[in-house]
Image: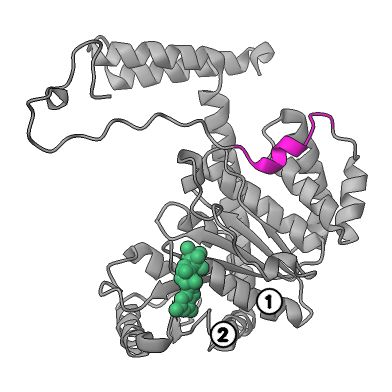
């Protein structure tokens, strides 16, 4: 805040001529998944009802089960874990594709176009999104417009926007769990979409087989627009909007990206990431991008990397889940919460060092944990 009590900031006075600071934006409450509103605290279905419905490919029950995963109610969480456990043996049989790109790159148009082709071919496609922006702002980059018009009404498609409440770690785990349920429900292609702004890519990368980066040509900053780390994670790059006057620029960008990718160390998969141009609007080269993905799957299944990566991802998920649990258990403990508030003030007043404060907090936490009543 730039106004302290009744003291006005100097820039607010009438005779101030310079640039003015924008008024602070009011902090908005976190957005809760709209699906959660529909879910009563009391769930009428049993674990077995959920499992049977999912295995039967019942979309409505699958959707309710995903809502259960998203819920922050303890009993929903426990029930969801049981459903996931029972669905686990039926999961895994899909191609998991992560799709990222800056807002406006054409992700939703691309998914709509490629997704409709996939669904038309008789495959079943689930699209899940991770949108870190929705945790902080009122609007969600991925959710605030009519997206994927054709795909959203296709009988072979299931589209589910991200759960918006909670930490990114939590959202990632929930998406990972939703993948399991979708696979058990018979979806054999899973798209996980995220905005290419840097926070969620690592999480998505840790849950997919192929990571596709959608890029734009003709912005003049093809290589700068996306973080190096995200490019390094990509198994393939699709330069979208290669149509009309943009064709030449798209081809130039293709070469630039190819050259840039050569500078990175060879990925563990042994697969040199490919770059292709396409137009989601004009439906050109979309099949080439899909072939890139299926070629990668064939290649990595043959050399054993496909399963190796999934096993590594499972380990990663185990660690992540433990970390998330520990963090929640620590920071959401009411005693610890109070102590943290107190120590924050003491730190400002220089009455305690950060290390002593941290040690005291951990000591108290250990004490609370050994006292069974507080567990
Ligand atoms: P997202 O924010 O990455 O999901 O991007 P959108 O799919 O919403 O697309 C942003 C804008 O780019 C929209 O106006 C689309 O119509 C347009 N767009 C998407 N793909 C193409 C394409 O292949 N060619 C052209 N010319 N425009 C496209």
Relative to 256, is 184 on the left or the right? right
Q: Quadrant of the N terminus?
A: top left
Q: Are marks 1 and 2 in contact (CB under 8 Å)?
A: no
Mark 2 CB lies closer than 8 A to ligand 1:
no
Tell whether 6 sits left or right of 216. Answer: left
Name the residue nearer the viewer: 358 or 92: 92
Q: Residue at x 42, y 84 (%)?
A: 242
Depth check: give the residue in front, 186 or 140: 140
Q: Which residue is mark 1?
A: 116
Q: In percent of the image, x 78 and y 55: which residue is there?
A: 88
Residue marked by disc 2: 283
Residue drawn at point x = 76 percent, y = 38 percent: 38
Secondary structure category for the residue under label 2 = loop
Give how far across and how far down residue 75 sits, in percent: 77, 30
Magenta span includes 14? no
Q: Secondary structure at mark 1?
A: helix
Note whether residue 237 is visible. no
Label at residue 345: none
Span shown in magenta: 32-42
Q: Is mark 1 within 8 Å of ligand 1?
A: no
Q: Is residue 171 above or below residue 281?
A: above
Q: Residue at x 27, y 17 (%)?
A: 353
Q: Position of residue 338 (x, y in %)?
A: 47, 12
Horizontal side, residue 23 vs residue 114: left or right: left
9 to 17, vertically: above or below: above
Whether residue 278 is visible to the viewer of this picture, yes or no, is yes
Mark 1 crowd level (few <14, some 14–19, many ≥20, 10 Å Cα): many
Which is more N-terminal, label 2 or label 1? 1
Is 36 covered by the magenta stretch?
yes
**Quarter location, residue 372:** top right
Separation of marks 1 and 2 at Cα, in angstroms:
11 Å
């Amino acid at each position: 805040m730039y106004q302290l009590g009744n003291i006005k900031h100097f820039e607010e006075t009438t005779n101030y001529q310079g640039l003015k600071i924008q008024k602070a934006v009011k902090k908005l409450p976190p957005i809760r998944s709209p699906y959660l509103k529909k879910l009563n605290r009391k769930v009428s279905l049993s674990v077995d009802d959920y499992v049977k419905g999912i295995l039967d490919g019942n979309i409505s029950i699958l959707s309710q089960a995903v809502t259960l995963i998203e819920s922050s109610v303890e009993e929903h969480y426990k029930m969801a874990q049981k459903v996931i456990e029972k669905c686990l043996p039926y999961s895994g049989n899909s191609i998991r594709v992560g799709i990222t790109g800056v807002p406006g790159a054409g992700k939703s148009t691309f998914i709509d176009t490629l997704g409709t082709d996939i669904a038309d071919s008789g495959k079943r496609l689930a699209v899940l999104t991770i949108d870190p922006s929705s945790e902080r702002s009122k609007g969600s980059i991925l959710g605030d417009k009519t997206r994927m018009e054709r795909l959203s009404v296709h009988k072979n498609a299931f589209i589910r926007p991200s759960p918006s409440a909670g930490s990114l770690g939590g959202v990632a785990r929930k998406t990972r769990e939703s993948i399991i349920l979708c696979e058990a429900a018979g979806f054999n292609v899973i798209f996980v979409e995220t905005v290419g702004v840097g926070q969620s890519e690592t999480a998505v990368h840790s849950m997919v087989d192929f990571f596709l980066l959608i890029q734009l040509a003709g912005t003049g900053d093809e290589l700068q627009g996306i973080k190096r780390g995200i490019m390094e994670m990509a198994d393939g790059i699709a330069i979208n909007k290669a149509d009309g006057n943009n064709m030449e620029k798209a081809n130039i960008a293709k070469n630039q990206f190819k050259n840039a990718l050569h500078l990175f160390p060879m990925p563990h998969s042994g697969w040199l990431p490919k770059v292709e141009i396409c137009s989601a609007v004009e439906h050109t080269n979309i099949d080439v991008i899909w072939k890139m993905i299926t070629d990668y799957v064939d290649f990595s299944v043959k050399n054993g990397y496909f399963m190796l990566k999934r096993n590594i991802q499972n380990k990663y998920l185990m660690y992540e889940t433990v970390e998330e649990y520990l963090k929640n258990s620590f920071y959401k403990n009411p005693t610890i919460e109070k102590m943290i508030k107190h120590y924050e003030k003491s730190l400002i007043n220089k009455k305690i060092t950060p290390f002593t404060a941290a040690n005291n907090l951990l000591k108290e936490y250990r004490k609370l944990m050994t006292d069974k009543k507080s567990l």
